[in-house]
């Protein structure tokens, strides 16, 4: 093999290595930019939770639940196995009706659905949404589950299906 041929092979090999390194750096930069964008969008979701109307609805619903916690505990303690589901359902529905919080419950449910959509569509970072909201989502869904079931039955659908799927992930 001549020096010229060795030189050409070395040049080509070096060019391939350089192209591979440049490709890797470009890919890494692209992924970093994507991650930054996802986290930025996640921060917008956080901000929405702490602003009106979501924060107002969260405060109203939380205050309503706390106001009735004695009634809820009584039902859980004093109901028999056969009627605990019905009694709990009745108290949840009565809290929603008496305290007029149905709109606020839907504001929160819509916010959680939008947050889940943001994650599942790849626009938001899963961890950045799960850390602050997954526990809240679980508590919210568990408390209002009888209402969601009744509403879903009326519309022949699962109203809280996104929450259930996201919480179980």
Image (cartoon, grey):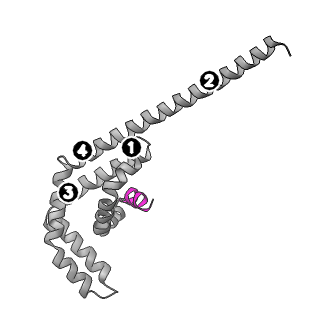
Label 1: which secondary element:
loop
Q: Nearer the viewer, mark 4 or mark 3?
A: 4
Q: 100 and 132: which one is in front?
A: 132
Residue 11 position by quadrant: top right
Chief secondary structure of the magenta portion: helix
Q: Nearer the viewer, mark 2 or mark 1?
A: 2
Q: Quadrant of the N terminus?
A: top right
In the displayed structure, 8 sits above or below 59; it is: above
Mark positioned earlier in the residue sequence (3 or 2): 2
How far apart are the two marked residues, 4 and 2, measured between alpha carbons? 43 Å
How far apart are the two marked residues, 3 and 2, measured between alpha carbons? 55 Å
Q: Nearer the viewer, mark 3 or mark 1?
A: 1
- Say whether residue 5 is left or right of residue 59: right
Which region shows up in magenta? 160-169
Mark positioned earlier in the residue sequence (3 or 1): 3
Residue 88 position by quadrant: bottom left
How far apart are the two marked residues, 1 and 4, measured between alpha carbons? 13 Å
Residue picked out by circle 4: 47
Mark positioned earlier in the residue sequence (1 or 4): 4
Q: Residue furthest front?
A: 3
Residue 72 % position (x, y)? 21, 77
Q: Which mark is residue 58?
A: 3
Q: 36 and 16: which one is in front?
A: 16
Q: Nearer the viewer, mark 3 or mark 2?
A: 2
Residue picked out by circle 2: 18
How far apart are the two marked residues, 3 and 1, measured between alpha carbons? 22 Å
Label 4: which secondary element:
helix
Residue picked out by circle 1: 124
Q: Residue furthest top?
A: 4
């Amino acid at each position: 093999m001549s020096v010229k041929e060795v030189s050409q092979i070395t040049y080509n090999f070096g060019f391939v290595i350089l192209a591979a390194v440049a490709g890797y750096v470009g890919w890494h930069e692209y992924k970093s930019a994507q991650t930054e964008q996802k986290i930025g969008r996640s921060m917008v979701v956080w901000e929405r939770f702490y602003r009106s109307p979501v924060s107002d609805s969260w405060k109203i619903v939380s205050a309503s639940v706390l106001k009735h916690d004695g009634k809820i505990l009584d039902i859980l303690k004093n109901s028999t196995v056969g009627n605990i589901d019905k009694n709990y359902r009745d108290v949840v529905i009565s809290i929603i009706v008496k305290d007029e919080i149905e709109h606020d419950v839907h504001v929160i449910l819509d916010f959680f659905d939008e947050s889940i959509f943001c994650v599942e569509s790849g626009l938001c970072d899963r961890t950045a949404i799960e850390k602050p909201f997954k526990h809240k989502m679980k508590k919210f869904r568990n408390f209002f589950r009888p209402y969601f079931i009744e509403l879903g039955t009326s519309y022949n659908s699962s109203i809280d299906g996104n929450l259930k799927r996201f919480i179980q992930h």
